[in-house]
Structures are given as C-alpha cells and as structure tokens.
Image (cartoon, rainbow, N blue to C red):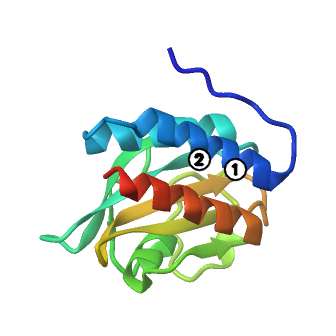
Amino acid sequence: MFQAEKYTGTKKDHYGLVTKQLKALLDGEPNKIANLSNASALLNQFLDRINWVGFYLYEEESNQLVLGPFQGLPACVRIPLGRGVCGTSASEQKTLVVEDVHSFPGHIACDAASQSEIVIPLMKDGKLVGVLDIDSPEKSRFDDEDQKYLEAFTEELMRHL
C-alpha cells in the first residue's frame, strides 16, 4: 500500500517530496490512465486549499480537451481549444496562473466555488497531450513557486506517459 508522506518544510522541499513520490508511483507502470489517476490523487492529497485537481486530455479529432482522471466534484467534459483557462493554456501551450477566475475572459465555471486556477499544458515530443488543471476556492492561491514546481511535476509525469 502506498502512503503519501506529509512534509512541513519549505515549499521547495515539499514539492521535491511529492515529485519523488510521483516517480515511485509511476515506476514500471505503462498505463496512461492509471498514471494520471495516481498523479491527480497524489496532488489532491499533497496540495492544501484546493477544490479540484485533474487532467483534460487533448482529442485531436475534435480539437477539444476531454475530461480525464481527476479528484473533486463532477466537471465539464469537453472544452474547446482557446476557450476558458484550460482551452487557452492548451492552445497557447503555456502555463496560466489566474488569481481571479471571474476576471478571466470566457472562464468556464464548472464549480462555482472556484476562485483561482493554475493550468499547465502537458507536452510530449512537442505535441499537446492535455493539461493539468488545479482550482482553489481562494483568490490568488497559486504563485510563481507553485508554477515552477508543478511544471517540474508535470515534466516528470510526461517522462512516464
């Protein structure tokens, strides 16, 4: 049985530990859905002050993001590229940190409690695979450090997909 360790040190050390735990969870497992499921569960356990964490996967045929493994309330199933925070992050292929989702043009409200959001595109061999989406019921929940370490987390994840 896997036990997620808690750490009370610096944010850098905390993210280092969760990335180390991710490596242990993914080592030797080739299944994409299993790995994304464990990654979302690990982040849900690790991050405080969030209300949703999960993945949207890029579906090339429809040019949309489709709901993948997640932790939280039921969510929007399909998001067109360029729409909302997730669709914009995916189309621009860059991380978006939104301090107040209600001020983001075209924001898609799947959970009315969400106030801030970070979305990180998942890239493999230069191609869009999907996005990691994390919502918080607090405004300005995510900062530059969260972005830096969550990008490192997704890079590790993509090495195993």
**Where 153 falls versus 87 (above or below)?**
above
Q: What element carries label 1?
A: helix
Please identify the residue farthest to the right as the structure is shown.
9
Which of the 4 image quarters holds residue 158? Answer: bottom left
- Residue 73: x percent and y percent? 51, 39
**Where 114 falls versus 9 (above or below)?**
below
Query: Residue at the location (42% across, 63% down)?
Result: 131
Crowdedness near tag 2: few (<14), some (14–19) or many (≥20) residues, C-alpha within 10 Å: many
Q: Which of 37 and 61 is in front in this view?
A: 37
Distance, label 1 to label 2, CA atoms, is: 6 Å
- Residue 116: x percent and y percent? 69, 63
The answer to whether residue 33 of the structure is visible from this angle is yes
Which of the 4 image quarters holds residue 93? Answer: bottom left
Which of the 4 image quarters holds residue 20? Answer: top right
- Residue 83: x percent and y percent? 41, 77
- Residue 145: x percent and y percent? 75, 66
Query: Residue at the location (70% across, 61% down)?
Result: 115
Q: Nearer the viewer, residue 65 or 111?
A: 65
* Circle 1: residue type: Tyr
**Where 77 falls versus 51 (above or below)?**
below
**Where 102 falls versus 78 (above or below)?**
below
* Circle 2: residue type: Thr
Q: Can you identify the residue that label 1 sits on?
A: 15
Left or right: 93 with respect to 103?
left
Left or right: 51 with respect to 139?
left
Picture mark count: 2
The answer to whether residue 71 of the structure is visible from this angle is no
Badge 1 vs badge 2, beta-carbon distance below 8 Å: yes
Please identify the residue farthest to the top as the structure is shown.
1
Q: Can you identify the residue that label 2 sits on?
A: 19
Q: What element carries label 2?
A: helix
Crowdedness near tag 1: few (<14), some (14–19) or many (≥20) residues, C-alpha within 10 Å: many
